[in-house]
Amino acid sequence: MDQAPDEEPEHEPDYRFTLANERTFLAWLRTSLSLLAAGVAVVQLLPEFAVPGTRGVVGGLLAALAVVTAAGGVLRWRGVEFAIRRGRPLPRQRLPWVLAGGLVVLALFGLVLVGLRAFA
């Protein structure tokens, strides 16, 4: 069977690279599950903040970050798998920056909420 001209040949990589890629993917999924659990905990377990509805906003932001992390982990796994099977350089990753930025925003929001409670 002839190969299309724009397709690159694949080769079976060293299994250690594939397994390392899979472990990294699973770490992204664990991070996503932790963010989702934190979102549920904020909504269900914390007392109401000084500003009404804040628990829902914080919980929703954590859940949204969980979705982005899980989806980004899948895309990263697929991109790396594609690269190692074709001998290409690994793709650049933006997901750590997105996750870190989202957590910084949530932490700053938490500091504001703590400050409001302290001065109330």
Image: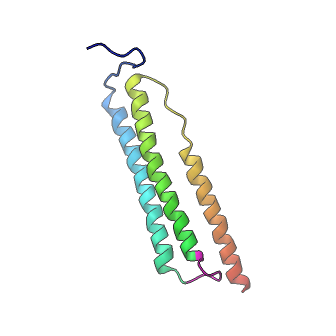
Count of numbered circles on the image? 0
Q: Is residue 74 above or below residue 2?
A: below
Q: Relative to 5, is 70 above or below?
A: below
- Foreground: 92 or 3? 3
49 inside magenta stretch:
yes
| Residue 67 percent location from the top left of the image | 47, 56
Most common secondary structure along the magenta stretch: loop
Q: Residue at x 43, y 34 (%)?
A: 80
Q: Quadrant of residue 16?
A: top left
Residue 9 percent location from the top left of the image: 36, 18
Magenta range: 48-54
Q: What is the x, y in percent for residue 29?
A: 41, 53
Q: Position of residue 69 (x, y in %)?
A: 48, 52
- Note whether 119 is above or below 25 in the view shown: below
* Residue for point 57% across, 43% down: 94
Quadrant of the image containing the N terminus: top left
**In terms of image quadrants, where is residue 53?**
bottom right
Front residue of 53 and 31: 53
Dividing the image into 4 quarters, which one contains the C terminus?
A: bottom right
